Image (cartoon, helix red, strand yellow):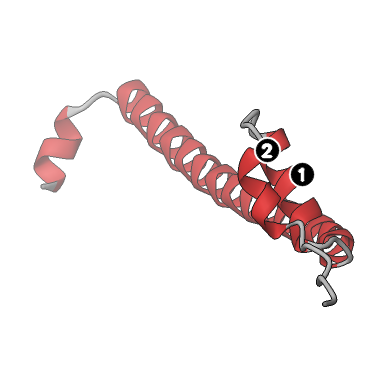
Amino acid sequence: MTALLALIPRPIKTALIWVLAAFVLVSASYLYGKREGAQQAVVEQLQSDAQAERDRNKSDAKLQALSDFDLCIQSLRSRGMPVDACEQLRGLPESKP
C-alpha cells in the first residue's frame, strides 16, 4: 500500500487530502442541516396542532350552546345543502287537550 502511495506525486496527494476533507465537511454540514430542518418541521407541526386545538375548543363552546335544529341548519348551510331535512329537529310544542 505504501509503495502505491509513493508512486503518486506529492501535489496530487495534497489535492486528494483537501478533496477528502471538503467532502467530509460538506457531508457533515448537509446532515446537520437536514436534522435541523426536520426538527424545525416538527416544531411547526406541533405549533399548528396546538393552534388548531385552541380554535376547536373555541368553536366547540359555541356549538354546544346551539340547539339541534340550529346546529343542523348551520352545518347544512355551510355545505351548501338545503336545510329542509332539519325541520324534524325543530321541536313542536306539545298540544294540550
| Camera-side residue of 34 and 89 | 89
Q: Is residue 30 above or below residue 69?
A: above
Residue 96 x/y as whole percent: 85, 76
* Label 2 Cα neighbours within 10 Å, binned few <14 / some 14-19 / many ≥20: some
- The residue where tag 2 is placed is 83
Q: Is residue 12 above or below residue 50?
A: above
From mark 1 to mark 2, how far is it between C-alphas?
9 Å
What residue sits 78% from the left and 62% below the top?
92
Q: Circle 1 is placed at which residue position?
A: 74
The quarter holding residue 49 reads bottom right
Label 1: how many Cα within 10 Å (few below 14, some 14–19, many 20+): some
Under mark 2, the amino acid is Val
Q: Residue at x 40, y 29 (%)?
A: 19
From the top left corner, tell me how far across and down residue 48 is, in percent: 74, 51
Q: Is residue 9 left or right of residue 89?
A: left
Identity of the residue drawn at 33% across and 27% down: 10
Tell me residue 47's x, y (percent): 76, 56
How many marks the image carries: the answer is: 2
Where residue 71 appears, as percent x and y from the top left, is: 76, 54
> Callout 1, which amino acid?
Gln
